[in-house]
Image (tube, rainbow, N blue to C red):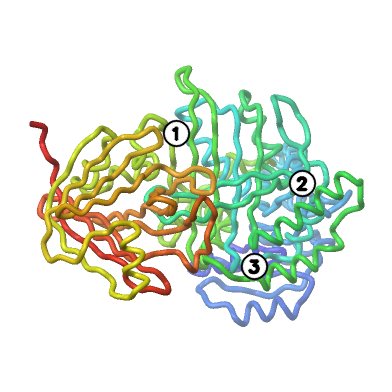
Amino acid sequence: MKILILGGYGVFGGRLAELLADCADLDLLIAGRDRQRAEGFCAAYRGQARVIPLQLDRRDIADALTVQQPDLVVDASGPFQDYGADGYRVIEACIAAGVDYLDFADGADFVFGVSRFDAAAKAAGVFVLSGVSSFPALTAAVLRDMAKTMEIRTVDGGIAPSPYAGIGLNVMRAVVGYAGAPVKLRRAGKDGHGTGLAESLRFTVAVPGRLPLRNIHFSLVDVPDLQVLPPAYPALTDIWMGAGPVPEILHRILNLLAKARSTLRLPSLEPLSRLFYWVLNRMKFGEHRGGMFIRARGQADGVPVERSWHLLAEGDDGPYIPSMAIEAIVRKLLAGIRPEPGARSSIDALDLADFEALFAPRSIHTGFRADEPDAPFYRRILGSAFDALPPRVRELHASEAARRWRGVAEVRRGKSPLARLAAAIIGFPKAADAVPVTVTFTPEAKGERWTRDFGGRRFTSLQYAGSGKNAFLLVERFGPAAFAMALVVDGDRMRLVPRRWSLLGVPMPRFLMPGGPSFETDADGKFEFNVEIRLPLAGLIVAYRGTLEPVLPA
């Protein structure tokens, strides 16, 4: 099978070629205007697929199809928003030559307009699928899964790339170009407009049982979903899609420029795209992780419901996700499974299972969450991962009723003056090899108070489910200090990972945050706890480990 990839040495085209490296039956024409770059890509390529450099301007696509006779054309060039009056030249040439076509288009108007070629594509017996990427192929697959159990009324979502992922110049041109410009969408049940990059929301991407991303600032982007999804869901009244690039300071500068353009009716910010491209690709710091979310609200059996889907991608795997939709279709073609002829968007091209099969070998994790306001707060934080907890851990956290557990513990204390002072302020127990311990759980309006008694030495904390920037985190408050922790299910353990902290309600620097390995698990049918608290300047404050069993009512 021969595939001609326009922009084959670029960000998305190059990653698609890498994803298909194991396919020995493929010939990949790595096409673009710069022959030297095409040759350089092919020389560095490692894989079983055969790669051939091809110098080609998209304006000459008709002649190239005659000479090269590919089975499939993939347009990975862009920016699709800038193709102008002759924007569908490649599609028209493919239909005329009887060649199948896929693209990575992120321009909403471009993707929405592809259906005008449906009759011609069917007559030619070819498929033309546009927007075959995260937006809208993946989002549509997620929503179809959600729609099995609810009537969808509103949708919002976003993508947050890793700061190390890099971004192509054409993508930056497209994004900066519509900053401050009207963006077509569905709002309050009517076709309307938002303002590109001038509308924002915050969200925490949190796959159940995994370490969540930090709370991220998302801003409205002009993606195909905004136009192609509403017709598929007649009850849909509102849709909003955003992007959350980091660092946030640069993102907020772009927000301000977008609002200024909209308010003052300034010209396009596209001339600034090279500056943003240069800065964004050099400000690489923070966690090398990315993510995505889709949240739907609607009705199920007459009751209001909310469901959300979360994706986490670790390290270098995240940047490949936008190319995986086309990878999935190519692999289906190799297996003899063809999309139906016709020209349309990609919203029905793939199922969620198709993506999950490609995610499975990589560090890409997904999961659904449902709004459960009446569930115990540990279950609300962990979602479906709560059911994977060891039995005793699950039992301890499955109730918010008053209860008491009792056991024995070993306590170690730090010896530095600062460690002693911190331990004295909180009331941590003294060092001991085996001290009787009782934990009393008392429900309160906001959460649950834990009163720990180590051989007569008592200290308390208040635990509750976080909100806002602490969403999907467990917050534990010791007097004026509050610590927001992620609950991570790791085999037979639930690890508590500090993520944020505050003092007297004021957010504090992360580099001063207390930490240390802490987890809960089962041991010989008992609940086992292991807590270690360290301060960056003081070292060990306290460490205590032991086991507990429930005290049965008299």
> Image quadrant of residue 521?
bottom left
Disc 3 residue type? Gly
- Estimate the x, y position of residue 414 in percent, counting from the top left: 28, 71
**Residue indicated by mark 1:** 371
Mark 2 and mark 3 lie on one chain; the one further toward the N terminus is 3
- Estimate the x, y position of residue 77 in percent, counting from the top left: 73, 61
Disc 1 residue type? Asp
Is the residue under label 1 in contact with that under label 3 (CB below 8 Å)? Answer: no
Q: Give the Cα distance between marks 2 and 3.
A: 21 Å
**Residue indicated by mark 3:** 166
Question: In terms of secondary structure, where does tag 2 sit?
Answer: loop
Quadrant (top left/top right/bottom left/bottom right) for the N terminus: bottom right
The residue lying toward the viewer, choosing from 479 and 434, is: 479
Q: Is residue 216 visible?
A: yes
**Residue indicated by mark 2:** 196
Q: Give the Cα distance between marks 1 and 2.
A: 29 Å
Name the outermost residue toward the left: 554
In the image, residue 308 above or below residue 60: above
Q: Residue at x 26, y 48 (%)?
A: 389
Q: Is residue 126 visible?
A: no
Is the residue under label 2 in contact with that under label 1 (CB below 8 Å)? Answer: no
In the image, residue 280 above or below residue 234: below
Q: Residue at x 19, y 45 (%)?
A: 391
In the image, residue 400 above or below residue 435: above
Question: In terms of secondary structure, where does tag 3 sit?
Answer: loop
Question: In terms of secondary structure, where does tag 1 sit?
Answer: loop
Left or right of residue 460: residue 551: left
Left or right of residue 539: residue 5: right
Left or right of residue 7: residue 313: left
Mark 1 and mark 2 lie on one chain; the one further toward the N terminus is 2
- Estimate the x, y position of residue 330 in percent, counting from the top left: 55, 56
